[in-house]
Amino acid sequence: MPKSKEKPIDFKKLGITLKDIELEDKRTSKEIAAEEKSRKKEIVQFVTTMGLGISVGIVIGVVLFFVKDEKLAIAGGGGVVALLMALKYPYLAIWAFAIYMPFAGTVTYWVGGGNAVFQLAKDGLAYPAYLAVYQSLKKQRLPFLMPANALKPFMILAACIALTMLSQNLAQQFSSDPKGKPIAMGVIGIKVLIGYLPLITCTYYLLKTKTELLWFTRLHTLLAIACCLLGVLQYQMLSSGACQGTDHLAGDDLFKATLEYKCLVGGSLVFSPSQNMIRLPGTFVAPWQWAWFLIGNAFTTFATTFSDASIKWRAVGFIGLALVFVNSMISGQRIALLLVPVIVIALLILTGQLAKPKTFIPIVGGMSVLIVGAFILFPDVIQGRIDSTISRWQASPPTAFIAEQAEHSTGGFQPFGHGVGRATNSARVFGEAALIETYYPKLMYEIGLGTLAFLGLVTAITVTTFKAYRSLKDKDLRSYGASFWVFVFFISYQTYYYPLDVDPVAVYYWMFAGLLLRLPEIDRQESEKKHQALQRLRELLASGQLRRYLKEKEKKKKR
């Protein structure tokens, strides 16, 4: 006979939710004691290891201080600690990497005096962590490249890059006129193109549970708030005259970003309000990086605002989203001013928030009040930003700009391109690089037909992450998935300027792809927990012990 279906539980009548039911700890006292002992041992080992690393770092720092200067001493000593942590505790290094990245520009110019070693410090955390994760996964016979269907496109792309390096970079290196150091430019170009791709795997294994997922999203929200508050202070100091800005200069200098007048945080800036010319860098090296940080964090803060289960964290997310709006208006970043509102509207539709009026109306109402208040308090500033955006659009529409760049990059087209790194900004230190300000025309110039392979790679990632997020059953996780997938989709085919070449998008893109791939496993875990809690609740109801259980639980809370 077929099994009879269990009657659904009326949670409203009971006045509880499944979250009120704690699962029984089925471990024995010996197992609990063994786990506690193991945890203490790990803590002692961590403290010992890091203590040794810090000691060695201090010694190296002191030596470098007397041999060279204090900046190299900080870089050398800190580098030793970072390297040791990355090799011994790779996932902790990935957390540190994510925290340091938004402040790397500030550290580079305010601590390191512009020394590129400080800008590369985050890579000192990332690359050793890649190696440690790879070795760990190899021992466990787990795949390193994620997702599996990206393997073929990646191998094709790697082959195209190798052919370009051999036929162009290597040939140029040994020509009569190498124009710099083509092989070194190629190495930098490869690092920029696929150097952060392993973050997919690292993030996938980093986020083992929903708790770690929440840490990840909340951390990025807090980082966004911290950086945006510093961005507001930067603008305030420039407006009040605490920082000089560039408005006192003459001629072309009024419109050029310069490090000489950096303010509070970040690097080069322009602040010439008399000319309606403001370009602030926030905590980053250059203004346009700040713009893409704001664009990227429109997604992260939105996800926390609408998807976090905690009301307190949704409020924190709203503060973050509001600050992203404010900075997009005051920092002079036209692309952020255009895209941040569009992204929020698109996410409201695509994540299904319009169907949740209790959540949707208060938050959107608050954002509306904020925007109206900004127009009332800073009418000249906001109008100036809007006028600047409109005039820029009229002078050079994005479509026309992209077409012009594509035409330039395809002139004298070569199947294997002109050389890896030959149009990459960070490779300029090793030789002359072409200025191509749109992403896929830039790739076409560098690696020729290899551009199709890169498109194949990001398409494989986009399709796989879409399938992953659409498979989710948990509503909160599905909402997170929708927010981050729209970001992955947008960046995969976005060609205006080149955000995938530099921080922060060069980091966020691969990390968020790894997060999306992990969501189905987290969804399965949560589904299993709900099933177990439901079974426990049925047992309590059947035995008539539910009220007693809830009273005892309440007493424990009060203790």
Image: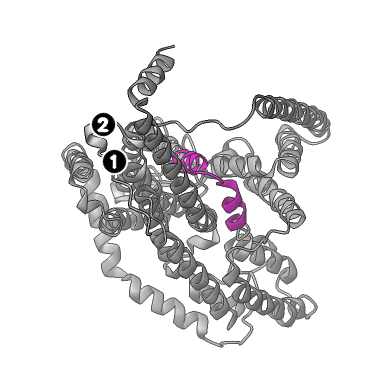
Q: Is residue 203 shown in magenta?
A: yes
Q: Position of residue 278 (x, y in %)?
A: 35, 48
Q: Tag 2: Cα neighbours inside 10 Å, few (<14), some, or many (≥20)?
A: few
Q: Is residue 403 shown in magenta?
A: no
Up-down: is 411 above or below 363?
A: below
Range covered by the magenta-colored residues: 199-220
* Residue furthest top as drawn: 559
Q: Position of residue 190 (x, y in %)?
A: 66, 66
Q: Quadrant of residue 59?
A: top right
Up-down: is 45 above or below 365?
A: above
Residue 232 appears left or right of 180: left
Q: Nearer the viewer, residue 195 or 360?
A: 360
Q: Which residue is tagged 1?
A: 9
**Labelled disc at residue 262:** none
Q: Tag 1: Cα neighbours inside 10 Å, few (<14), some, or many (≥20)?
A: few
* Residue furthest front as drawn: 1
Q: In the rendered structure, which amino acid carries the disc numbered 1?
A: Ile
Residue at the location (63% across, 69% down)? 421
Could you tell me if the residues under marks 1 and 2 are in contact, i.e. CB atoms within 8 Å?
yes
Query: The C terminus appears in which quarter of the rendering?
Result: top left
Q: In the rendered structure, which amino acid carries the disc numbered 2?
A: Leu
Q: Which residue is tagged 2?
A: 14
Up-down: is 146 above or below 154?
A: above
